[in-house]
């Protein structure tokens, strides 16, 4: 095992912090930062681990980390505290190769979750996790969404963000138009002209794309217009609305198995 890093100003530690904090740094390096033994082990199932930084007690507590095919570098507790994005460090941090899903996976997908301007990493991660849980094939992120491989998004997704094919587009309405052209039904979670979810049907032989908008503003008119129809979740008068993660998860559950 390599000598431990004890300086918080070490260049490798500074680079790991940049990958933790900045999506631009992640894209430039082709790497993402994962924190915690459970998340690192989950990420390693789908992505190559290039480096693992960990305190000796953390390595001893989780022997399975030794199975990762990566350079393991011990770090002191103060260094672990600097690397940690949470109040209480778990003492384990990994640098992984960014997933690059093949475009063919999106072309073949029968159930897609699309997000527009969902800025909260917790909501994006939760929705990706729900998409994986309910058998969706891919996730499509439009402009303004939280970075899929930020630490908060990864934690909320419980690792699903690296297991699910996640694609990004600079023009969501145009991407939805492409999906419709191939026969997929695109359903906007919106109130404008919406039909109740109970009346939306489930017979979509070309597949279905569920489209969720931002927490505060919902979907843009352009995104709604690019969809086949808008759907709303029937609710009692006791609640005015649901947040993006909850509403999206209800829709994903409702349309599970559609188009399969």
Image (tube, rainbow, N blue to C red):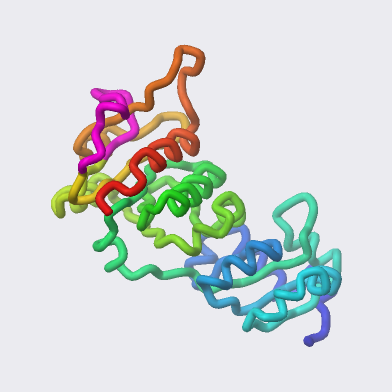
Position of 69 relative to 148 (above/below): below
**Where is residue 180 shown, x and y percent of the image?**
17, 48
Residue visible at 19% across and 37% down in the picture: 228
Which span of residues is magenta-colored? 187-203
Residue visible at 24% across and 62% down in the picture: 107
Horizontal side of 230 relative to 85 (left or right) equals left
Q: Is residue 149 magenta?
A: no
Whether residue 7 is visible: no
Which quadrant is home to the C terminus?
bottom left
Q: Going by the picture, which residue comes out furthest to the top?
A: 237
Camera-nearest residue between 136 and 20: 136
Camera-nearest residue between 28 and 93: 93
Horizontal side of 132 relative to 225 (left or right) equals right
**Where is residue 46 shown, x and y percent of the image?**
51, 71
Residue visible at 21% across and 44% down in the picture: 204
Residue visible at 70% across and 55% down in the picture: 85
């Amino acid at each position: 095992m390599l000598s431990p890093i004890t300086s918080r100003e070490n260049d490798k530690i500074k680079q790991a912090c940049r990958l933790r904090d900045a999506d631009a740094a992640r894209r430039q390096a082709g790497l993402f930062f994962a924190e915690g033994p459970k998340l690192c082990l989950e990420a390693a199932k789908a992505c190559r681990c290039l480096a693992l930084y960990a305190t000796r007690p953390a390595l001893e507590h989780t022997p399975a980390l030794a199975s990762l095919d990566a350079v393991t570098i011990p770090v002191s507790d103060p260094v672990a505290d600097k690397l940690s994005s949470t109040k209480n460090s778990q003492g384990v941090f990994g640098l992984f190769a960014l997933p690059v899903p093949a475009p063919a996976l999106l072309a073949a997908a029968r159930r897609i979750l699309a997000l527009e301007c969902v800025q909260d990493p917790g909501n994006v991660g939760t929705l990706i996790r729900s998409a994986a849980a309910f058998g969706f094939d891919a996730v499509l992120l439009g402009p303004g969404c939280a970075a899929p491989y930020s630490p908060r998004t990864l934690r909320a997704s419980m690792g699903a963000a690296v297991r699910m094919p996640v694609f990004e587009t600079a023009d969501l309405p145009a991407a939805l138009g492409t999906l419709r052209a191939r026969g997929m039904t695109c359903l906007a979670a919106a109130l404008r002209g919406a039909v109740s979810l109970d009346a939306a049907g489930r017979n979509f032989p070309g597949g279905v794309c569920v489209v969720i908008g931002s927490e505060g503003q919902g979907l843009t008119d352009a995104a709604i217009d690019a969809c086949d129809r808008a759907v709303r979740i029937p609710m009692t008068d006791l609640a005015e609305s649901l947040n993006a993660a909850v509403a999206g998860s209800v829709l994903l559950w409702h349309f599970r198995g559609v188009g399969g």
